[in-house]
Amino acid sequence: MSTPAKLELVSFKICPFGQRSVIALNLKGVEYTLTYITPQDTPDWFKAISPLGKVPVLLVDGKPLFESAVILEYLDEVYSPQLHPADPLEKAQQRAWIEFCSELLGRQHRMLTAKEEAGFNEARESLQQGLQRLESALDADGPFFAGKDMRLVDTVYAPLFMRLDLLQKHFDLDFGLSTRLQTWRDALLALDAVKTSVVEDFESAFLNFLKMQDSYLLTRKQ
């Protein structure tokens, strides 16, 4: 029997792309270590293993894998249970919606870091439109993206919903989620694999990140 690979995931505490990898690892029950670095002071060893200078990076017996979507694909090929569907077309469609989530996270980030009201409103509207478009791809019965079974595509949306919840809680930001999207969100955020995918002080760390941005969000009237 071959020796299991030693896995080390390197990320930032509040990185949603790193969080999606942690969720997948948790769902698969894989043994791994998690190393957090700070974005303002990335160590030289990290720069050497991350060609794009971004997190997450998964070290597999010391060999680096970068880009979260690639990391997810690797984990799903190597470790059970497989979270991608077996049907090639369905798998490809869900991969496409994984990419769509990355775009939504980008819109969310632009909203959080916008310095002026116009930029904030534009990013917020774009995010809401994306969420509405997302709903059309969901299985009608749910509760997850494609029905009753959680898939790899679900792992990438949990971090987005977690952040949307915090924005509503602390800034009264309502994104007009439909009943179907709320059902999906609630099912994801109730999972232990999701709850344990962030540090214990994640909420305060996320709020501290927002304060450091000195963005319009912090000054807008409620």
Image: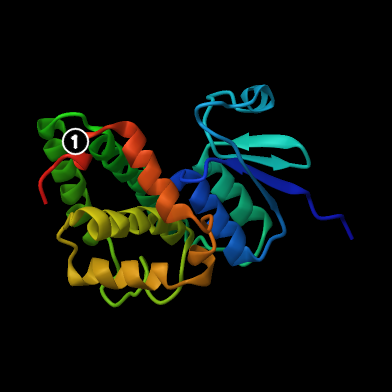
Position of residue 26 measured from the top left corner of the image (x, y, whole percent):
60, 63
Position of residue 206 measured from the top left corner of the image (x, y, whole percent):
40, 47
Q: Would residue 8 be found to the left or right of residue 53 on screen?
A: right
Name which residue type carries label 1.
Answer: Tyr
Position of residue 126 measured from the top left corner of the image (x, y, whole percent):
17, 42
What residue occupies the far right of the structure in this picture?
A: 1
Relative vertical location of residue 89 with respect to residue 143 in this rendering, above or below? above
Relative vertical location of residue 211 with respect to residue 195 in this rendering, above or below? above
Relative vertical location of residue 42 with respect to residue 9 in this rendering, above or below? above
> Mark 1 Cα within 10 Å, few/some/many (few <14, many 20+)?
many
Q: Would residue 37 be found to the left or right of residue 179 on screen?
A: right
Which is nearer the eye, 207 or 174? 207
Position of residue 103 measured from the top left corner of the image (x, y, whole percent):
32, 40
Which is nearer the eye, 133 or 64? 64
Q: Would residue 126 be found to the left or right of residue 41 on screen?
A: left
Q: Would residue 47 be found to the left or right of residue 191 on screen?
A: right
Q: Residue at x 32, y 32 (%)?
A: 213
Relative vertical location of residue 144 with respect to residue 209 in this rendering, above or below? below
Which is nearer the eye, 8 or 173? 173
Q: Residue at x 16, y 58 (%)?
A: 174
Instruction: Please indicate, yes or no, whether residue 156 appears anywhere in the rendered image.
Output: no
